[in-house]
Amino acid sequence: RFLYLHIDKFRYLWYNMGTKKKGDGFMNMRDEVKIFKALADENRLAVLKLLQNGEKCACRLLEALDISQSTLSHHMKLLCDSGIVNYRKKEKWMYYSIAPECRELLHEIIDQYLSAAKCSCCGQEDKNDT
């Protein structure tokens, strides 16, 4: 019943088809799973390590990782689709970089799972909710 309109990689404007209300909606659990899956591979983590110091051409990533071009393309598609990595095409080459907003978003997602739950009535930590 909701139509999501893409604003940027991490925020969506939702339109409730039933009540016709507009508002900001943030990532749902399915989007978070997509991010965690993108991070759950040693080749993709190696790509992120290589991109830490800035944008890299796909040819440089291929040299450093010693994987095939099709394997790199697969990994980069997952990283880009999850919003962790940005890309741009210049002539026949693809250039990749870590999305600047990604760092803050990852902190927020992880924090929501690891921070202690608060009781809704008194605000104290709920020690039974572990």
Image (cartoon, helix red, strand yellow):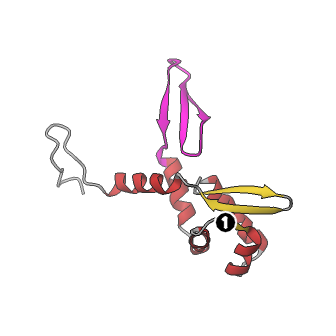
Give me the residue at 64% from left, 61% from top: 97
Residue 51 highlighted magenta (yes or no): no
Between 40 and 109, the one lying in front of the other is 109
Secondary structure type for disc 1: helix
Q: Extreme right residue here?
A: 91
Q: Looking at the picture, how far across and down is residue 43, in whole percent?
A: 61, 74
Give me the residue at 15% from left, 47% from top: 124
Give me the residue at 29% from left, 55% from top: 115
The range drawn in magenta is 1-29
Q: Looking at the picture, how far across and down is residue 26, in whole percent?
A: 48, 40
Amino acid type indicated by mark 1: His
Which quarter of the image is occupied by the C terminus? bottom left
- For residue 15, what is the image quadrant? top right
Residue 22 highlighted magenta (yes or no): yes
Please state if 61 lies on the left or on the right of 50 as rendered: right
Give me the residue at 67% from left, 66% from top: 75
Q: Does 105 appear above or below 45?
A: above
Task: Inspect this view and state whether residue 1 appears.
Answer: no
Please state if 99 lies on the left or on the right of 69 as rendered: left
Q: Looking at the picture, how far across and down is residue 82, in whole percent?
A: 59, 54
Residue where numbered disc 1 is placed: 75
Between 97 and 47, the one lying in front of the other is 97
